[in-house]
Amino acid sequence: MVNWEEFVLHIDRIDGRILAALQLDNRLTSDQLSEIAHLSPTAVQRRLKRLRAGRVIVGDVSIVSPKAVGRPITTLVSVTLERECAQIIDRFKRSIRTTPEIMTGYYVTGETDFVLVITSKSMDDYEDFTRRFFLENPDIKCFKTMVIMDRVKSGFAIPIEVDELEDA
Amino acid sequence: MVNWEEFVLHIDRIDGRILAALQLDNRLTSDQLSEIAHLSPTAVQRRLKRLRAGRVIVGDVSIVSPKAVGRPITTLVSVTLERECAQIIDRFKRSIRTTPEIMTGYYVTGETDFVLVITSKSMDDYEDFTRRFFLENPDIKCFKTMVIMDRVKSGFAIPIEVDELEDA
DNA sequence: AGTGAAATTTATCTAAC
DNA sequence: GTTAGATAAATTTCACT
C-alpha cells in the first residue's frame, strides 16, 4: 500500500522557476510567468493548476502589516511543558490551534517543547495574554518571552535551486 | 513635522473583513469579497488598491510546501553574538538577508539575540550549513538548534477583531 | 504524455453618475 | 458608494508534435 501522505509531484526546472516567482508575488499573471518560465501562458496555467492540486503550492495569502491593524507587538515564546506525555502535548496543540493571538506554533526538539509567535496590541495586552494563556495552564512548566525588535527577514520563501532540478 | 513612517491608513469594519479573508486566501475574486464585505465588487477593488498602496497589505505570496521542493527539514536556531555592539549586529543582519537558507530572521530581546528559521534538504545538509554559517563566524558566541517536529499552526494570519473597528 | 492557439467565460479596470 | 461598458485575464476546447 502506497503512503499517499508522502506522495509529491515531480517538479522540474520550469516548475521551480514558477514557484520561486510566486513565493515572492503570487499576483503575477500567466503572461508574466510565461516570460519567467519560457513557456506559453496556457502551459503555465496548466502547471499552476497541477501544483495547487498536488499541494506543492499549499496556499495563497495576503500578508497584512501587523502595525496597520493595531498589533505592533510580536513576541516569540518558548514553552516547556510539565511532562512530555502524549495527552498533555495533544491538549496543548489543540489550545494553540484555537487561540487566534498565536500566529504560528511549532512543536520542537531541543531546549523547549514549543515555540510560539504571538501578536499583541501592546505590551500590556501581551502580559494580559500570558496570564490567561500560560499562567492559568497547569500543564506548562515554564515559558520564556522574546520580543521581536527587528524583522530582519520575514519571508516564507524556500530557496529553490532551479539548476539542481532536471529539465522539463 | 509628521512622522510619515508611523502613518497608517484608517481601517474600518469592512476593510477588516476584507483583510481577514485575504489573509487566508488572496485568490478570492472581487465578486466573492463583495459578498463577504456586503459591498459592490468595484468598491471592494478600490479598497484593495488603497490597502495595497497604503502598505496595509504588504505582500501577496504563494506558500510552497517545503517537503514538495526537497527541503523537509526546518529548524529554529537561537543565536547569541559575542558582543552586542551595533557593528556586529548590523553585520550579522546583513548576512541573514543574503543567506537563502534562512527563511526568517528576527532580532529579539531576552535569552538570545537572534532567532532564525532555516530550511534544509536533510540533517546532514543542515549540519553542513551550521559549519559554514555559524562555526566559521567569529561574531557568534553560541547557537542552539531546535528541529521542528510538527507545525501545529503555521499561518501568518493576524487576528482582526472586526467588531472593534468602527463602521464604514 | 505535454504543449500552443483561438474562442468562451470570467474577472478587473475605467469611466460615468 | 453604485452601475455600465471597455479592457484584460483565466478557462475551455481543440489541433499539433
Image (cartoon, coloured by chain):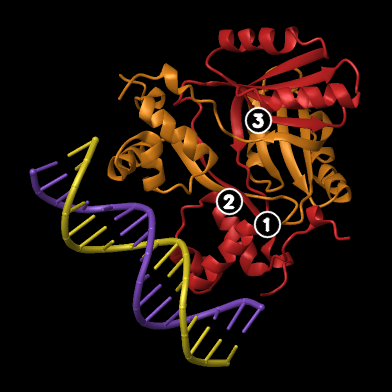
Chain colours: A red, B orange, C purple, D yellow
Q: Is residue A31 depicted above or below B48 in this figure?
A: below
Residue highlighted by disc 1:
A160
- The amino acid on which the numbered mark 3 sits, given as a three-letter code, is Tyr
Q: Chain of mark 3?
A: B
Q: Quadrant of residue A69?
A: top left
Question: Which dot, 1 or 3, sits closer to the camera?
Answer: 1
Horizontal arrangement in the rendering, residue B111 relative to residue B106 (left or right): right
Q: Chain of mark 1?
A: A
Label 2 with label 1: CB-CB less than 8 Å: yes
Percent of width and height locating residue A43: 53, 72
Instruction: Name which residue lies at 57% across and 11% down.
Output: A125
Percent of width and height locating residue D2: 22, 41
- The amino acid on which the numbered mark 1 sits, given as a three-letter code, is Ile
In the image shown, does B7 or B46 lie closer to the viewer?
Answer: B46
Q: Quadrant of residue B147?
A: top right
Instruction: Name which residue lies at 83% across and 46% down.
Output: B126
- The amino acid on which the numbered mark 2 sits, given as a three-letter code, is Gln
Which image quarter holds the N terminus of chain B? top left
Q: Chain of mark 2?
A: A
In this orientation, does residue A63 appear?
yes
Q: Secondary structure at mark 2?
A: helix
Sort mark 1 into few (<14), some (14-19) or many (20+) by Cα contacts within 10 Å: many
Q: Which mark is residue B106?
A: 3
Cα separation, mark 2 vs mark 1, equals 10 Å
Q: Secondary structure at mark 1?
A: loop
